[in-house]
């Protein structure tokens, strides 16, 4: 799953065409500076769908351009759709306007833009992955890690979530129970560090157990939902997965399962029977790239 942004000159106006985002709208174009809706759709829907692209064009002081945005990544599902769109927009404008930004520049700028739109609550993880691709170990900064690909199954609940609201909820819990929540954060960090050699050595059963531990820790932070839990336990049970956990900020959205090599279809069926939409995916894919016209 990817996001694409095309840029072309449009003298005298700035237009964003987001009809390719797969939204439940009739399709629209808009001028992000004035808010003028040029074709079908409501101005509120147009603004919400385009707020990340609008933030990029304002940050780069763009004029006289048309941007066409497409994505087949589920929106507001915890799969980094906003980061992918921000990175794709920056990459397209960097090429069209000959800005000379490196991938490192784009990743840093994308994080700043996403964080601003989310009112200071965004993390550098999704924007780093969207830019560089592959595996990234994200702490103070993103560091590339050479690991083999994994076949996973994503289960979508169909429940949208707002990342900023979920992050704010965890921050409030941290304020009220600082000692407990900080220990949960530390445990999540330990899980991440221990997962790296499991992936490297192909120890999928151990990796699955770490995913299950991680899911429990995230549930303790209050970001789980009944719908996510049903997909997680379906994947672990009838789906015969080594492990499964929610992904993203929680509060809806998606979970991921690590099926045994011969059980990917079983995991998809189990997730579907539990009410989710199953999507087989592979890790370690390419990040930002320029595609031929």
Image (tube, rainbow, N blue to C red):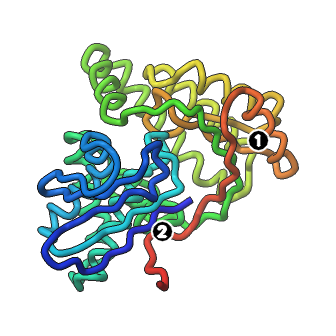
Instruction: Tell me if mark 2 has few (under 14), some (14-19) or many (20+) residues whose alpha carbon lies within 10 angstroms of its own.
Output: some
- Considering only order in the chain, which callout, 2 or 1, is on the residue closer to the N terminus? 1
Q: Residue at x 83, y 46 (%)?
A: 265
Question: x%, y% of residue 77?
Answer: 49, 40
Numbered mark located on residue 268 in the image? 1
Q: Which residue lies at the image location 51% right of the left edge and 30% below the top edge? A: 159
Q: Along the line of sight, which residue is nearer the eye, 210 or 83?
A: 83
Q: How many marks?
A: 2
| Coordinates of residue 51 in the picture (x, y in percent) | 26, 49
Say which quadrant the N terminus sits in. Answer: bottom right
Find residue 26 and report its horizontal and vertical position in percent. Answer: 43, 48
Is residue 265 visible to us here?
Answer: yes
Choose top left, top right, bottom left or bottom right for residue 237.
top right
Q: Residue at x 13, y 57 (%)?
A: 33
The answer to whether 55 appears left or right of 78 in the picture is: left
Query: For the residue labelled by badge 1, is the local secondary structure a helix, a strand or a loop?
Result: helix
Image location of residue 139, percent across then percent down: 37, 51
Q: Which residue is mark 2?
A: 287
The Cα–Cα distance between marks 1 and 2, rounded to whole angstroms, is 26 Å
Q: Quadrant of residue 99?
A: bottom left
Q: Residue at x 76, y 41 (%)?
A: 268
């Amino acid at each position: 799953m990817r996001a694409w942004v095309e840029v072309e000159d449009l003298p005298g106006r700035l237009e964003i065409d987001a009809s390719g985002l797969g939204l439940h709208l009739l399709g629209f174009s808009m001028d992000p500076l004035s808010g003028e809706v040029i074709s079908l759709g409501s101005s509120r829907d147009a603004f919400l769908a385009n707020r990340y692209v609008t933030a990029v064009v304002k940050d780069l002081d763009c004029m006289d351009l048309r941007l066409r945005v497409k994505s087949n990544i589920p929106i507001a599902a915890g799969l980094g759709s906003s980061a992918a769109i921000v990175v794709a927009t920056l990459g397209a404008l960097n090429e069209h306007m000959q800005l000379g930004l490196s991938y490192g520049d784009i990743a840093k700028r994308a994080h700043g833009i996403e964080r601003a739109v989310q009112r200071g609550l965004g993390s550098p993880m999704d924007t780093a992955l969207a830019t560089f691709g592959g595996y990234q170990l994200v702490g103070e900064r993103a560091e590339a890690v050479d690991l083999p690909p994994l076949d996973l199954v994503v289960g979508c609940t169909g429940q949208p979530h707002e990342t900023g609201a979920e992050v704010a909820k965890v921050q409030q819990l941290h304020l009220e129970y600082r000692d407990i929540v900080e220990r949960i954060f530390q445990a999540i960090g330990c899980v991440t560090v221990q997962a790296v050699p499991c992936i490297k050595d192909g120890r999928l059963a151990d990796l699955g157990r770490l995913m299950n531990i991680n899911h429990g820790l995230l549930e303790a932070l209050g970001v789980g939902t009944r719908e996510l839990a049903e997909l997680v336990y379906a994947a672990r049970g009838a789906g015969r997965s080594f492990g499964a956990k929610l992904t993203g900020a929680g509060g809806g959205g998606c979970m991921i399962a690590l099926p045994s090599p011969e059980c990917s279809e079983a995991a998809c069926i189990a997730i579907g029977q539990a009410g989710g939409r199953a999507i087989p995916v592979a890790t370690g894919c390419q990040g930002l790239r320029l595609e031929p016209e």
